[in-house]
Amino acid sequence: MSSKEIFGKSSIGHMTVGWSCDAGGSRTEGLTGATGEDGQSDEMFRSGWGLTAFISTFTDGFLQNGMAVQRYFSTELIDHVETDSEPPPMVPIVIEVPTRECERVRDFVKDYLHHPGKPYKKFGMLPDPLKFEGAGCGSFAISALSLSETWAPLTKTFWRTFAIPERLLGRLTADQLPENVEPAAIAKSAHDVVSISRVGLIVKDWDSGRPAYQMHFVDPELPIFALRTWEEVAASEQRPSKYQRQHMSLLKRTLYFPAKSPDSIGTIMQDDKDSGAQEINENFDRSFQDVARAVRSAAKEFANHGLKTQLVNFPLGVGVMVANPN
């Protein structure tokens, strides 16, 4: 939020899930991602809905097919090349698992798509995809992968529980709501309206106030940090190329906003293009430590079963392949 508002940058990204299942010589492959929300949250943010804009559920969701996923990432790359800006890293991680686990992931996606409740139309961070309530891109991909016994220990470290104070939730009336939105909070009358400005939300203390929600969600920075850790494990076992080292460096920074009062905003906006850049490592908090520990434990377990972890160049970036070298 702060990076987009203050620096004109956004680094949340997108998360997708793919599979390639081989059973008895018959192979099934797929690639998909949950998506939705065509600008309504920005409109809500500008109107004074505060954090309500980010925890509402949007009813224009859908599942992308493989071509749409590839088009999304390739378009992002082309846009950055044309504007001579640093390209966003696309980091696939491919792990060889038993066929039955691959089929569980595939079948979940199939069941989700054909569920009579049409959960794919509900896009947001609050719904539980495993209960077919809906999903965000991160919770959908991580929930699908959690059905693989191989992936499950790692996916558990990507979730975070966050108490959302009521004071961060704007409440406007239904006539001020964009289309295709189920708000997490709403004003029943003009007397109940609570408007929170964009800057006001950013500079508020998020750690105080009566909690309105115990939000359990996939924190995007945790799987990103896991990808970075996987790359470091792979790089320790081979000599990365210059291109691979450059790509890996893109995962070493994240944007944050340290301001505690509106007075400091002008100073930050006058800083250079790297303002607000902070490297996140496993000592940042307990969650990052758990992710790093889970990745290294998994890599060791894979090695004990004869699987090799290596850096691999993909068409749109660099990723990690964990598979039997034979």
Image: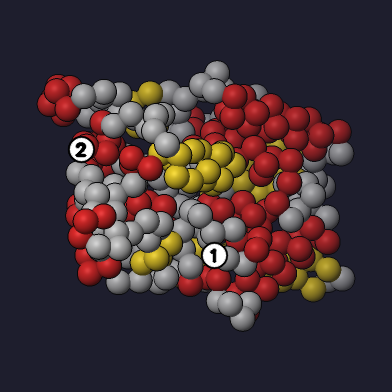
Q: Position of residue 238 (x, y in %)?
A: 65, 28
Q: Residue at x 66, y 61 (%)?
A: 130
Look at the image and tell me whether residue 214 can be seen. Answer: yes
When asked about the image quadrant of residue 104, the answer is bottom right
Going from N to C along the chain, the mark reached first, 1 or 2, is 1
Q: CA distance from mark 1 to mark 2?
A: 30 Å
Q: Residue at x 22, y 49 (%)?
A: 195
How many labels were placed on the picture? 2
- Residue tagged 1: 134
Q: In the rendered view of the protein, which quadrant contains the N terminus? A: top left
Look at the image and tell me whether residue 43 can be seen. Answer: no
User: Image height check: is 239 above or below 243?
Assistant: above
Q: Residue at x 21, y 24 (%)?
A: 261
Q: Position of residue 73 (x, y in %)?
A: 42, 56
Q: Count residues near mark 2 (Cα–Cα under 10 Å), then give few for <14, some for 14-19, many for 20+.
A: some
When asked about the image quadrant of residue 312, the answer is top right
In this orientation, which residue lies closer to the viewer: 50 or 240?
50
Residue situated furthest top in the rendering? 283
The three-letter amino acid code for the residue at tag 2 is Val
Q: Are marks 1 and 2 in contact (CB under 8 Å)?
A: no
The three-letter amino acid code for the residue at tag 1 is Gly
Q: Position of residue 285 (x, y in %)?
A: 54, 23
In this orientation, which residue lies closer to the viewer: 303 or 202?
202
Where disc 2 sits, the SS reads helix
- Residue tagged 2: 199
User: Image height check: is 245 above or below 23?
Assistant: above
When asked about the image quadrant of residue 275, the answer is top left
Which label belongs to residue 297? none
Would residue 212 be found to the left or right of residue 131 on screen? Answer: left
Would residue 208 be found to the left or right of residue 149 on screen? Answer: left
